[in-house]
Amino acid sequence: MPATLTALLCIGLNLGTRTQVQSGTLPKPRLGSKSGSVIPQGKPVTLWCEWTLGAQEYGLYKKGSQEPWIKNTSLELKNSALFFISSMTQQHAGLHRCYYRVPFGLSEGSEPLELVVTGIYSKPSLSALPSPVVNSGGSVTLQCGSQLGFDRFILTKEGGDKHSWTQDSQKDSSGQFQALFPVDPVTPSHGWSFRCYGCYWNQPQVWSEPSDPLELHISGSLPKPKLQAQPGSVIPWRSPVTLWCEGTLEAQQYYVFREGSPAFSETKMSPGPRNKAMFFIPSMKEDDAGRYHCYYHSTEGWSELSDALELVVTGVYSRPSLSALFGPVVTSGGNMTLKCVSWEQFDRFILTKEGGDKLCWTLNSQRGPSGQVHALFTVSPVIPRQRWMFRCYGCYNTNTQVWSKPSDVMEPLMSGAAETISTSQNSSEPKTGSQPQDYTVGNLIQMGLAGLALVAFGILLFQAHYSQGRTQDAASI
């Protein structure tokens, strides 16, 4: 009975297959990959082709090929076949289909399987705008960029719920090619780790190396930390700067990053709770300039994002010149117009006031008839109780945190010599017992000069009297 049942089943299957062949519709097989469809260059990959009723021959086609790329034959009926690629290369990338052959004919091709090879070009960069710390339910824009002229960028989300997005590239003002990917909503129920790749139109299945991973963090309810720079936020080129992120005693990890770029993103872990962490930049350069944030993590969760700290590097371009438009002397409480000018075609000029109450003004440049660019800064009111020392810098719109060398210092004078001296002493020197000694020395110098003048006057009188006597003696002779 079992043998008879088996024979009847075989007859039924053969009759069903013959009927499908006669109508020209042999069922298409299924094609899949055991290693996924995105394969790093040089890695092995195994493909499978399956048809439930069984066949003695299976073949694998790549789009654009007339002949089967790989054949798998057997004397017995098999409901699947494996195709093994020992080392993934550019030649293996593309759209693939498989088929099977039975005594009654050839099946349709399977649905296409796209195989992608990665690691052919250098990796792009991936960053979050404005930052990788996002409010729950909020949105963020991910920017994938490269100096290579990729036609497309691909963003992939890693983890259990894998997704991918593709965008055509755009060339920005700096010459970099980039694509922007909006991501929302960002919720705590999912992991948010991303990478991106670049590719060209003529080989859409040949990708670059993956970018460094970018992980989004959900902003927590812990107090936001404070981010500071020492010795300051305006740093000369190739000088060191230290960033301090100060949180709570419960903080265990600190993170700092620069907006719009993954080039500076660091994590500090401490064996025990600490309320601050240090991040050191040993040599400040153009790539280090920008807006920085920090945040921290503890057993209670994530903190809010710190306020932005803008780091500026100076000394990259030649120095402009700074002068007072109507002369360096100004009346107390009056206005002053300062002119910053340069032959370099800066888009902006920045005027800084040095001293205890540091101030900063920024103006767009104007082109003069001589070809120089300049900006006019009006400062008011100028009062004696402050010391007024100014410098100016130039920068371009493409990177507003990269400044020129500073101009020479310009220090205006208050009208009236006594007022000028008094203003200078009150703003630069503390009131100590050494000041009376300074006035005594000045008085002694003045008395000495007066004595010398009297001696000189006496000598002149003596010479005049002596010359008159000689004249009278000569007349008497």
Image (tube, rainbow, N blue to C red):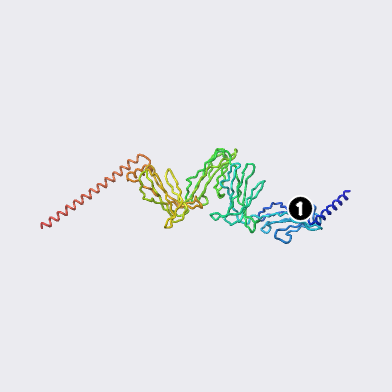
Q: Quadrant of the C terminus?
A: bottom left
Q: Residue furthest right?
A: 1
Q: Residue furthest bottom?
A: 66
Residue 378 appears anywhere in the view: yes
Residue 408 appears anywhere in the view: no
Residue appearing at x 42%, y 57% in the figure: 369
Q: Is residue 15 left or right of residue 49?
A: right
Q: How many marks?
A: 1
Percent across and percent down for residue 62 are 71, 58
Q: Residue furthest front?
A: 23
Circle 1: is it few (<14), some (14-19), or many (20+) Cα within 10 Å? many
> Depth check: 60 or 367 in front?
367
Percent across and percent down for residue 159 are 66, 46
Percent across and percent down for residue 116 are 67, 55
Q: Is residue 144 left or right of residue 434?
A: right
Image quarter of residue 192: top right
Q: Is residue 85 left or right of residue 422?
A: right
Q: Which residue is mark 1?
A: 50
Q: Is residue 365 left or right of residue 331?
A: right
Q: For mark 1, give the secondary structure.
A: strand
Check the image and report above or below for 101 versus 245: below
Percent across and percent down for residue 185 are 62, 44
Of the residues shown, which amino acid type is indicated by label 1? Glu
